[in-house]
Image (cartoon, grey):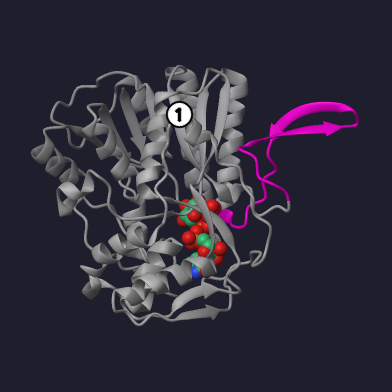
């Protein structure tokens, strides 16, 4: 497959690029360093420094012989987006800087992914809105005009559904009303401005599917944890970005880091907030299986991309158990919840669809968490306590 990865420098984008490249696909990554720049601007601290995307692609090529073509560009500019489909693209790094043709599969990760970032203040809210919606809209129009056959795999979020008091279906809900039936997108009600942009993305893509027969798979992903993938272990310099701060760190990655430096685990409020979680390795499996079984023309196919559910308190307790085995003094501390969210609620999402197309889940066992403790522990001296909690309020 010719695979185009939008947002190829991020936590999930870079591992995805290596995964497909390793399997012999023709891979191009695009990124504008939004995430790295935001990390620098907000001084969030990072577990370890990262080579640039061009350097990573070069290291990857030296070690494996595979080429990942690199484009540094801002996809909110429609001409940059269109260049990836009309051949006018300029590569910042490539072994062979020829356009190899219209992509078969587009992985869309090019979004501002953090709920706290989107609520820092009105400026960051606007950046989140304009980045996420313009990139998605530019993609929809590029597909309509230049690549209507290409299949898009978009990373959505379980947070679009919120925490309704009914079972969450995989994207769609059949409704009977006054004796008549129809199928609609499952009701969405997000808990942050970031999550709201993902609802708007869904609407833009669904519009493109209805009007122009686009083919889109939307993966409603829960919080991801993990650090290593089968490709990143080849060389330390290939590791993905790892954040543990309040803005960009997700909860499991944060708890492990906190345990290692003796910072009481930051459980927000009662800790009954339940979400569906998945290992970073399973994100790769999910996008792979989705790419191998594409949506049909005119289909918006939606899967709930989670492997198991936990409450925040359950995650904290697991971290404490594993941390103590590793000789860390781990305490759990409930702090006033800076977010506006239900702390005790019903949560019963369906998530069989991805397993039906061949995904075999990794679960968050003590052993898996121990593996993360070992890797994060190697960088203990880089961990900054001052960025762990800053209290971005909703
Ligand atoms: N939480 C704590 N303590 C912390 C950090 C988080 O109790 O120190 C709680 C939060 O309040 C929330 C839950 O843990 O109830 C998950 O928080 P998170 O920061 O790990 O995840 P979230 O903000 O929801 O966002 C992350 C990703 C986002 C993705 C989303 C999937 O950053 O890109 O879309 O997970 S989901 O949560 O299903 O919407």
* Percent coordinates x, y for residue 229 in the rendering: 27, 47
State the residue lying farthest toward the right. 178
Q: How many marks?
A: 1
Name the quarter where the N terminus is drawn: top left
| Residue 343 within the magenta-colored segment of the rendering | no
- Indicate left or right for 10 with 120 as reference: left
Q: Residues within 10 Å of mark 1 (few under 14, many from 20)?
A: many
The residue positioned 47% from the left and 46% from the top of the image is 131
Note whether ligand 1 is within 8 Å of mark 1: no
The residue positioned 17% from the left and 32% from the top of the image is 67
- Indicate left or right for 320 with 267 as reference: left
State the residue lying farthest toward the left. 62
Tell me if residue 23 can be seen: yes
Quadrant assignment, res 381 = bottom left
Above or below: residue 63 compared with residue 139 = below
Name the quarter where the C terminus is drawn: bottom right
- Indicate left or right for 60 with 387 as reference: left
The residue positioned 36% from the left and 51% from the top of the image is 34
Quadrant assignment, res 24 = top left
The residue positioned 57% from the left and 23% from the top of the image is 299
Q: Which residue is mark 1?
A: 152
* Percent coordinates x, y for residue 380 in the rendering: 24, 73
| Residue 192 within the magenta-colored segment of the rendering | yes
Tell me if residue 127 can be seen: no
* Percent coordinates x, y for residue 392 in the rendering: 52, 70
| Residues in magenta, as a range | 166-194
> SS class of the residue under badge 1?
strand
Q: Is 220 or 101 nearer to us in this picture?
A: 220
Q: Is 323 or 204 nearer to us in this picture?
A: 323
């Amino acid at each position: 497959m010719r695979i185009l990865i939008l947002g190829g420098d991020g936590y999930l984008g870079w591992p995805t690029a290596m995964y497909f490249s390793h399997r012999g696909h023709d891979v191009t990554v695009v990124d504008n360093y939004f995430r790295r720049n935001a990390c620098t601007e907000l001084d969030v601290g990072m577990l370890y420094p990262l080579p640039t995307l061009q350097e990573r692609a070069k290291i990857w090529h030296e070690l494996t012989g595979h080429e990942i073509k690199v484009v540094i560009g801002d996809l909110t500019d429609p001409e940059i987006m269109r260049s990836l489909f009309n051949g006018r693209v300029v590569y910042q790094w490539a072994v062979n800087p020829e356009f190899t043709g219209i992509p078969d599969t587009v992985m869309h990760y090019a979004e501002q992914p953090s709920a706290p970032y989107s609520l820092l203040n009105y400026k960051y809210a606007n950046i989140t809105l304009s980045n996420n919606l313009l990139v998605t809209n530019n993609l929809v129009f590029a597909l309509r005009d230049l690549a209507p056959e290409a299949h898009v795999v978009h990373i959505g979020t379980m947070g679009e559904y919120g925490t309704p008091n009914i079972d969450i279906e995989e994207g769609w809900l059949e409704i009977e009303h006054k004796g008549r039936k129809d199928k609609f997108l499952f009701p969405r009600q997000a808990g942050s401005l970031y999550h709201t942009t993902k609802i708007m993305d869904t609407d833009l893509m669904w519009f493109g599917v209805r009007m122009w027969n686009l083919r889109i798979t939307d993966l409603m992903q829960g919080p991801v944890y993990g650090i290593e993938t089968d490709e990143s272990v080849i060389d330390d310099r290939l590791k993905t970005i790892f954040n543990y701060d309040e803005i960009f760190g997700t909860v499991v990655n944060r708890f492990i880091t906190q345990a290692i430096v003796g910072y009481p685990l930051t459980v927000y409020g009662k800790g009954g907030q339940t979400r569906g979680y998945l290992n970073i390795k399973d994100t790769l499996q999910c996008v792979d299986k989705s790419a191998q079984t594409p949506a049909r023309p005119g289909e918006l196919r939606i899967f709930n991309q989670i492997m198991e559910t936990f409450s925040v308190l359950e995650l904290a307790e697991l971290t404490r158990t594993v941390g103590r085995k590793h000789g860390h003094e781990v305490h759990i501390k409930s702090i006033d919840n800076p977010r506006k969210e239900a702390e005790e609620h019903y949560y019963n999402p369906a998530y069989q669809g991805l397993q039906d197309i061949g995904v075999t889940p990794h679960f968050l066992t003590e052993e898996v968490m121990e593996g993360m403790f070992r890797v994060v522990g190697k960088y203990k001296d880089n961990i900054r306590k001052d960025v762990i909690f800053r209290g971005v309020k909703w």
